[in-house]
């Protein structure tokens, strides 16, 4: 922090004077990867291994979720009857991310089914922890919360 003060000299000209010499910048503690001091995911600053991610996928999530990018994220596609219902679904998924402070990547698109000659509305939800550059236990927790939410949406 640098402080300056406006001073008047005898010749009635104004000038600024330096008050403090504490010009060192403070490091942002959240800008680094987790370490021994700060490990918000309890994983030692490392993403889940492929084996651990596979075990969590099989034990905790509904069918449809897949490990993508060599277990660096989990992803699932959801199918909707129309675009408006898909948009409503995205709003509810976004609320879950906001409440849990863990935000997924969400995409909404239409896919042409050539054999049926019809359009299909698809929402893709992808979870990962950017700080760890991979998956954390929190990604699987959030995916489970989304699965629970789906039970209420589609009933």
Image (spheres, grey):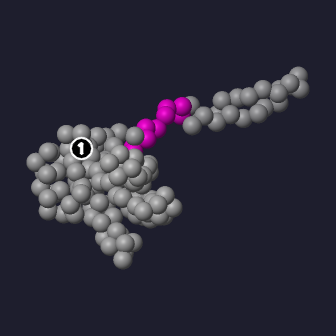
Q: Classify residue 80 by image quadrant.
A: bottom left
The extreme bottom residue here reads 155
Task: Classify 134 as above or below 142.
Answer: above
Which residue is located at x 66 percent, y 29 percent?
18
* Visible residue check, residue 79: yes
* Residue 32 lies in the magenta-colored region: no
**Is 1 left, or right, of 151 in this rendering?**
right
* Residue 27 lies in the magenta-colored region: yes
Give neighbour class at mark 1: few <14, some 14-19, many 20+ (Cα, 10 Å): some
Which of 120/53 is in front?
Answer: 120
Task: Classify 72 as above or below 119.
Answer: above
The residue carrying mark 1 is 68
Which of 51/32 is in front?
Answer: 51
Q: Which SS class for mark 1?
A: strand
Q: Return the x and y of residue 59 as percentages of the image width and height.
A: 14, 62
Q: Return the x and y of residue 51 as percentages of the image width and height.
A: 10, 48
Which residue is located at x 17 percent, y 56 percent?
57
């Amino acid at each position: 922090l640098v402080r300056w003060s406006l001073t008047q000299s005898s010749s009635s000209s104004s000038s600024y004077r330096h008050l403090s010499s504490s010009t060192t910048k403070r490091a942002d503690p959240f800008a680094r990867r987790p370490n021994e001091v700060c490990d918000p995911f309890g994983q030692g600053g490392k993403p889940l291994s492929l084996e651990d991610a596979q075990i969590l996928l099989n034990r905790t999530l509904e069918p449809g979720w897949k490990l993508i990018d060599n277990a660096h994220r989990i992803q699932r596609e959801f199918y909707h009857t129309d675009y408006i219902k898909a948009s409503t679904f995205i709003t509810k998924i976004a609320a879950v991310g906001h409440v849990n402070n863990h935000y997924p990547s969400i995409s909404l698109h239409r896919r042409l089914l050539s054999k049926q000659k019809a359009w299909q509305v698809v929402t893709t939800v992808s979870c990962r922890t950017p700080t760890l550059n991979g998956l954390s236990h929190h990604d699987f927790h959030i995916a489970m919360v989304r699965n629970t939410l789906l039970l209420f949406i589609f009933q």
